[in-house]
């Protein structure tokens, strides 16, 4: 038995007490046993191992509903001659250039880098959408090995696309199919599989049919939808249908499918998404950085769509994305009093609901039977603090870097800002060498 104690406790449990001024969480194995007052739990479990929150905030760990491991080595990168003027040039000149040079070695380094950064910022569950067209076979297995090693719960898929030719496309489809089979066989509660697709403007009808055949109804799909207007134009001009309609035609939609972005969807498409119970994930910082627009979050909510929050790997800090989501929605609506409930629900409620569609144990909440995914934030409030205003404190007072302790599935991954069982200097050295190799290939020079 382990007790996380000596802190203010936020449970996010709508069916029980949401806040304990002096709280504690008891967990054994992978699940939470009890939540309550510190004095009561200390007396009940006198032999328990103690994790001291040191007066910080004890709360559920974060979930990132859409990210890209393959972009981890791009931090600080500048590719000579790459000066994009539109979204397609951003993709072709930066991200596709990177993934075309990623081998399994680079994929492993990217995964290790992202997982360590997630742990440091209190993220214990990710939904990743991977691409490494330099070496496709075995890439998801390689990421899964890193996920197990670092202890971060992961739902993985590979980005199928026609952009690099039919052979690469077939390999990408097979990589998804093989990993889905691997997950079915292994039954690891910390790993799940989706069937990935890039975006509709790089996917033909023939490729969609091959994806559906290879999946054979085993899992949902993870795909970018109407992120830029080029996606809409391509569907209308080449297929006579809007993107969401094309997805519906091919049987891609459904309760286990995630549509990333959905910036340029119309009312009819929203109705289709709602009727099929398909999930949507907003990535506010990436959308603004790529100048593709602001997702119609308020309208998607009004249509009753399950809408979660991701980062698109622009950051691994979910609180950073939360702040930008609120500001962008208010700026877009020209109203300073909208978006609060929608964006906080996206991160703190809906991401847990998305997680529940792929992982059996409840996530995003501290209650008996839920996953022992617990973080401690180094935050000492100087204004009144409780579950009634916790979101205000998180938006205006906290960042992911204030995470001091991270526990995932009962495993302590970081304690008092020190990664557990990881030689960070050695890891960083290996990652740096992989990054230098990648950057050198992209720029034809030595780093």
Image (cartoon, grey):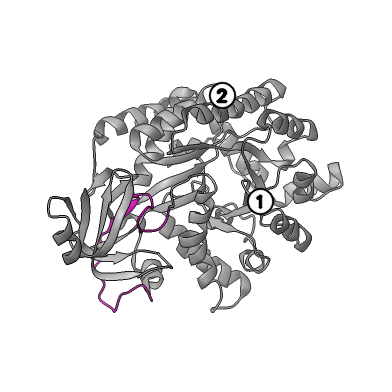
Q: Is the magenta stretch mostly helix, strand or loop?
A: loop
Along the line of sight, the residue nearer the viewer: 84 or 223: 223
Residue 15, above or below 278: below
The image's mark for residue 136 is: 2
Q: Residue at x 85, y 45 (%)?
A: 237
Along the line of sight, the residue nearer the viewer: 210 or 103: 210
Circle 1: is it few (<14), some (14-19), or many (20+) Cα within 10 Å? many
Along the line of sight, the residue nearer the viewer: 124 or 403: 124
404 magenta-colored = no
CA separation in Å, label 1 and label 2: 24 Å
Residue 101, above or below 196: above
Query: Considering the numbered disc 1 on the image, is that residue within a helix, a strand or a loop?
Result: loop
Task: Give the x, y percent position of residue 332.
Answer: 61, 69
Q: Which residue is drawn at 56% across and 33% down?
A: 131
Along the line of sight, the residue nearer the viewer: 358 or 317: 358
Q: Give the range drawn in magenta.
A: 363-388
- The residue tagged 1 is 227
Residue 128, above or below 62: above
Q: Residue at x 34, y 48 (%)?
A: 31
Give the quadrant of the C terminus: top left
> Which badge, 1 or 2, is on the more N-terminal residue?
2
Q: Confirm whether residue 217 shows in the render.
A: yes
Residue 86, above or below 102: below
Horizontal relation, residue 356 to residue 410: left or right: right
The image's mark for residue 324 is: none
Horizontal relation, residue 207 to residue 137: left or right: right
């Amino acid at each position: 038995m382990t007790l996380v104690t000596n802190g203010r406790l936020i449970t996010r449990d709508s069916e029980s007490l949401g806040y304990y001024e002096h709280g504690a969480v008891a967990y054994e194995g992978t699940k939470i046993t009890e939540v309550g007052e510190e004095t009561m739990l200390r007396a009940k479990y006198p032999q328990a191992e103690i994790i001291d929150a040191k007066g910080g905030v004890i709360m559920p760990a974060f979930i990132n509903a859409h990210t890209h491991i393959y972009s981890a080595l791009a931090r600080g990168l500048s590719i000579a001659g790459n000066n994009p003027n539109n979204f397609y040039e951003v993709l072709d000149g930066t991200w596709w250039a990177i993934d075309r040079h990623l081998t399994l070695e680079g994929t492993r380094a990217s995964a290790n880098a992202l997982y360590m950064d997630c742990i440091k910022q209190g993220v214990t569950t990710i939904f990743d959408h991977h691409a490494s067209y330099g070496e496709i076979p075995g890439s998801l297995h390689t990421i899964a090995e890193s996920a197990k090693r670092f202890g971060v719960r992961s739902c993985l898929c590979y980005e199928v696309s026609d952009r690099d030719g039919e052979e690469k496309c077939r390999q990408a489809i097979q990589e998804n199919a093989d990993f889905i089979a691997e997950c079915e066989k292994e039954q690891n509660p910390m790993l799940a599989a989706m069937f990935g697709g890039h975006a509709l403007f790089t996917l033909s009808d023939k490729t969609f049919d091959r994806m559906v055949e290879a999946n054979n109804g085993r899992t949902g799909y993870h795909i970018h939808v109407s992120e830029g207007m080029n996606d809409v134009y391509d569907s209308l001009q080449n297929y006579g249908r809007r993107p969401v309609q094309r997805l519906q035609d091919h049987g891609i939609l459904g309760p286990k499918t995630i549509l990333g972005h959905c910036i340029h969807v119309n009312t009819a498409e929203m109705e289709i998404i709602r009727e099929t119970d398909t999930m949507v994930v907003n990535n506010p910082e990436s959308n603004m950085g790529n100048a593709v627009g602001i997702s119609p979050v308020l309208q998607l909510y009004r249509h009753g769509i399950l809408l979660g929050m991701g980062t698109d790997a622009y950051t691994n800090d979910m609180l950073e994305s939360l702040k930008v989501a609120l500001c962008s929605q208010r700026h877009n609506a020209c109203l300073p009093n909208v978006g609060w409930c929608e964006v906080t629900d996206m991160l703190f409620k809906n991401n847990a609901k998305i997680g529940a569609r792929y992982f059996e144990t409840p996530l995003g909440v501290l209650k008996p039977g839920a996953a022992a995914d617990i973080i401690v934030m180094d935050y000492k409030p100087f204004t009144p603090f409780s579950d009634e205003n916790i979101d205000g404190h998180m938006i205006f007072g906290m960042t992911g870097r204030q995470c001091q302790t991270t526990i995932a599935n009962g495993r302590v991954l970081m304690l008092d800002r020190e990664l557990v069982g990881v030689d960070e200097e050695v890891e960083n050295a290996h990652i740096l060498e992989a990054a230098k190799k990648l950057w050198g290939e992209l720029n034809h020079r030595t780093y």
